[in-house]
Amino acid sequence: MAKKLEPIQLARRITLGVMLAGLTLLVILHQKMQGIPSIDALDPFGGIETLFKYLAGGEYIKKIEPGNIVMLGGIVALGVVLSRFFCGWFCAFGALQGVFGWLGRKLFRRRFIVPQKLDAALRWLKYPVLVAIVWLTWSTGTLIIRPYDPLAAFGHLSAGLSAVWAEFAVGLILLVVSLALSMLYERAFCKYVCPLGAVNAILGRIPLFRIKREASTCISCSRCDKACSMNIDVSHPDAVGSAECISCMECVTTCPTKKDTLRVTLAGKSFKLRTVVILGFAIFGGAAAVGQAAGMLEFAAPSLSEMAAEGKLMVEDIKGSSTWAMVAESFGVELERLYREAGVDPKKVPSDAMIKDTGTIAGIEGFEADAVRVAVAKILGIPYAGESGDLAPAAAPATAGAPAVGAAAAMPASETVAAPTTVAPVPTAAPADATALTVPSDFELEGTMSLSAVAVALKSSTAAVAAKLGLPADAPAEVPLRDLKDAYGFTMPELKERIKQ
C-alpha cells in the first residue's frame, strides 16, 4: 500500500501540477488565439536575459515582456530568503521532469544514481552555461539561445512537430534527452544544465534558509537521502548547506523519528513547515503585487492596433499570431496589395487567418511572418532589411519622406506608394527650433522609434525632433534611437525626459 502523502507534500505536488498545467494550456492557446502570452514571456529566465537592456534604457529584448522582470524579482527575493524554493515549488519545467521521474520509477522499479565524482563535476556545468547565455544575449541584444532552449521547444509543441523541428531542432533534441534522462536520474536538467537553477544556487549560498539535523535523535536510516530528488547527503552533516537543495522539504516530511530530527530554520531559528511554505507563497505573490502596482505585470505584448494608436508601431511588431486583416488595418495598407506583395493568394488564405498558419493553409513551404514584414515595409517605403538582416532595405517614398511605422495607421490605404529605387532624403522643411515642437502629454518615446518616426508621430520634422532631444542635426534619421546611445552618449530615460520638457 502506498504511503500517504504528508499535507505539505500534497500541497507541493498540487502547486507544481497547477503550474505545469497552466503553462501548457497557455502555450497551446497562444498558438490558437490573440493576446495570449508566448513561452518566452512566461519564462522567468527571460528577466535575466533582458536585464542589462532593461537597466540601461528601460527596454526589453524582443519577445520579452515586463512580466519577465516581475518574475525575476520574485525569484531573487525567494532565493535570498528561502534558497531554491522556486525550483521546488513553482517551476513548471521541474514539474515536467518530476512527472517523467515518476514514470521512470514505475517502469524500472529502481532509482539510478550518477557516480559521485562524475555527479560532482557535472553539477558545475550549469554555471558556464549561465555565463555563456547571459554574455551572448547581452552582447547581441537578442534571444540568441532560443533555438536551443528545451522549454521554448516544449512551448511550441502544439504547433506540430514539423514546425518545432524547423525552428527548435536542437531545443527539441535537448527536451527529449532531458526528459528521458529524468526517467533514470531525477531532475537531470535541473542538476546539471539549468541556467536559472544556477542563479538560484548562487542565491542559495546566502545562509538564511537551512535544514538542520539533530544527530542525537537521528537513527541513520537514510530515508532522507533516498527522498531527496537532488541526491544531497542529508543524513550525515549537521545542516544541509548544499546549493543544490530546492527547498522541497521531502527529507523533513520523510524522517520517521517524529522528533524534529530534521527541522527547517530561518536565520538559525526553527520554524514550522507550513510557516515556511506560506512565507514562500507570500514572497512570490508579493512580487506579483508590486509588479501590478508598478504596471509591469504584463505577459503579452500590446496589439498592433494599440501600438498604432500610440504611435509606436514598427514592422518588427508583426508576429506570426497577427492576422492579415489586423496587419492591413493597423498599418493602413490595402489588404489585397498586402497579399500580393507577400506572394499569397487571398482566395486560399482568409483575412482572419494568422500569418503563421499561412504556409499550411496555402501550401507554401517555409512561409514566415518576416515575409509580411518585408511586404509592409515595401508598401510604406520603410527601410527594413528583414529579420536576418540580409535583404535590401526598402527605400522611402520620394513624395513624403520616410513615414514612421509608428504612425502608419493614420495613413489611408489609398495613399500608400511603392518604394522607388533610390532613398529620398528625409524632409526637414519644418523649423529646427525645439520650441516649435508640440508634444502631447500622452506621447511616449520608445527606443525602437527613429527620429523620422517621432517626427511623423508628432507631425513635425526630424530636425525639430533632433533639437528637442539634444541630438546633432546630422544624426541618422532612420536608425532606432536605442542604437544611437553609444554614438551620442545618452540614455533612453534622458531622452524621454527631454521630450517631455
Image (tube, rainbow, N blue to C red):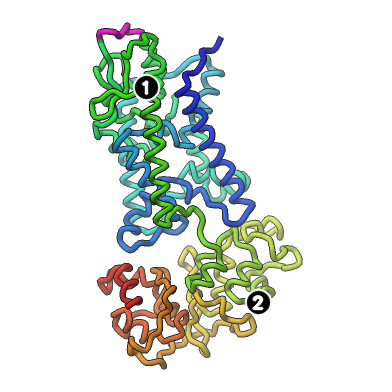
Provide residue 219's location: percent of width, then percent of height.
32, 6
Query: Looking at the image, which residue is at 48% across and 78% down?
Result: 404
Q: Which residue is mark 2?
A: 334
Does 364 sit left or right of 439 as displayed?
right
> Where does label 1 land, which residue?
231
Q: Which residue appears at 40% of the width and 30% of the height?
A: 277
Mark 1 secondary-structure assignment: loop
Q: Are marks 2 and 1 in contact (CB under 8 Å)?
A: no
Is the stretch drawn in magenta largely helix, strand or loop? loop
Q: Is residue 125 among the parts visible in the rendering?
A: yes
Q: Amino acid at mark 1?
A: Asn
Question: Quick one: quadrant of the C terminus?
Answer: bottom left
Res 118 seen here:
no
Q: Which residues are magenta?
A: 216-221
Q: Quadrant of residue 322?
A: bottom right
In the picture shown, does residue 268 fall above or below 80?
above
